[in-house]
C-alpha cells in the first residue's frame, strides 16, 4: 500500500547495520499484486534475493493474485520468500499454503512460538 511506504522505509533504513561495509541494495516499493508484476517491476536483470510478505493473507479472492505475483517475482534457485501472516482467516491461509506448495515452492514453518499464537511464519524456496 503506497500510504504505508514511508513507515516501511523508516523501519528498513533506520535499522542498525550489522556489517561495517555493505554492498547490499535494499529497495522498498509499493506492489499491487492484483496487477501483473512485470508491469510494475523489472526483475529480469536484478531479481530479488528476498520476498518479504507480511500480513497479506486475509481475503480468499486475493490468494491467487498474491501467489501469481510471488511466483512472477521469483528467480528459481535465487529468491527466498519469507511470509508472516496473522492467523485470522483459516480458509484463506490454507488455500494460500496449498497453492504455494502446488506452484513448486518448498515451505518450512519457522519460529512457531516466536510471534505468539496469532501469527505464523514460513520461509520458502523454489528451485524450478
Image (cartoon, rainbow, N blue to C red):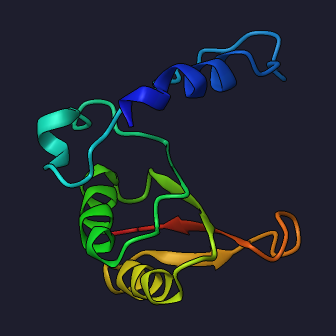
Question: Which residue occupies 20% across, 55% down?
Answer: 34
Instruction: Give residue 2's position: percent from left, percent from top.
Output: 37, 29
Residue 115 placement: quadrant: bottom right
Task: Tell me the quadrant of the picture where the C terminus can be found.
Answer: bottom left
In the picture shown, does residue 91 fall above or below 36?
A: below
Q: Can residue 29 be seen in this view?
A: no
Question: Which residue occupies 65% across, 17% down?
Answer: 13
Q: In this view, does 18 lie to the left or right of 126?
A: right
Task: Tell me the quadrant of the picture where the N terminus can be found.
Answer: top left
Question: Which residue occupies 49% across, 81% down?
Answer: 93
Which residue is more in the foreground, 48 or 95? 95
Instruction: Give residue 74's position: percent from left, percent from top.
Output: 34, 54
Q: Is residue 112 visible?
A: yes
Q: Is residue 66 left or right of residue 118?
A: left
Which residue is more in the foreground, 25 or 13? 13
Instruction: Give residue 64's position: percent from left, percent from top.
Output: 26, 73
Q: In this view, does 46 lie to the left or right of 88?
A: left
Residue reaching furthest top?
21
Which residue is more in the foreground, 24 or 29? 29
Instruction: Give residue 44's position: percent from left, percent from top.
Output: 22, 37
Residue 42 placement: quadrant: top left
Residue 38 placement: quadrant: top left
Question: Which residue occupies 57% across, 28% down?
Answer: 8
Amino acid at each position: 500500500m503506497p500510504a504505508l511506504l514511508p513507515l516501511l522505509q523508516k523501519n528498513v533504513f533506520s535499522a542498525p547495520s550489522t556489517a561495517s561495509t555493505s554492498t547490499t541494495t535494499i529497495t522498498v516499493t509499493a506492489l499491487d499484486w492484483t496487477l501483473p508484476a512485470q508491469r510494475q517491476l523489472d526483475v529480469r536483470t536484478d531479481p530479488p534475493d528476498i520476498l518479504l510478505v507480511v500480513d497479506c493473507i486475509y481475503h480468499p479472492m486475493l490468494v491467487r493474485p498474491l501467489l501469481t505475483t510471488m511466483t512472477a517475482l521469483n528467480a528459481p534457485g535465487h529468491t527466498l520468500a519469507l511470509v508472516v501472516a496473522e492467523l485470522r482467516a483459516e480458509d484463506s491461509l490454507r488455500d494460500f499454503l496449498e497453492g504455494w506448495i502446488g506452484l513448486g515452492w518448498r515451505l518450512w514453518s519457522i519460529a512457531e512460538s516466536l510471534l505468539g499464537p496469532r501469527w505464523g511464519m514460513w520461509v520458502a524456496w523454489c528451485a524450478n
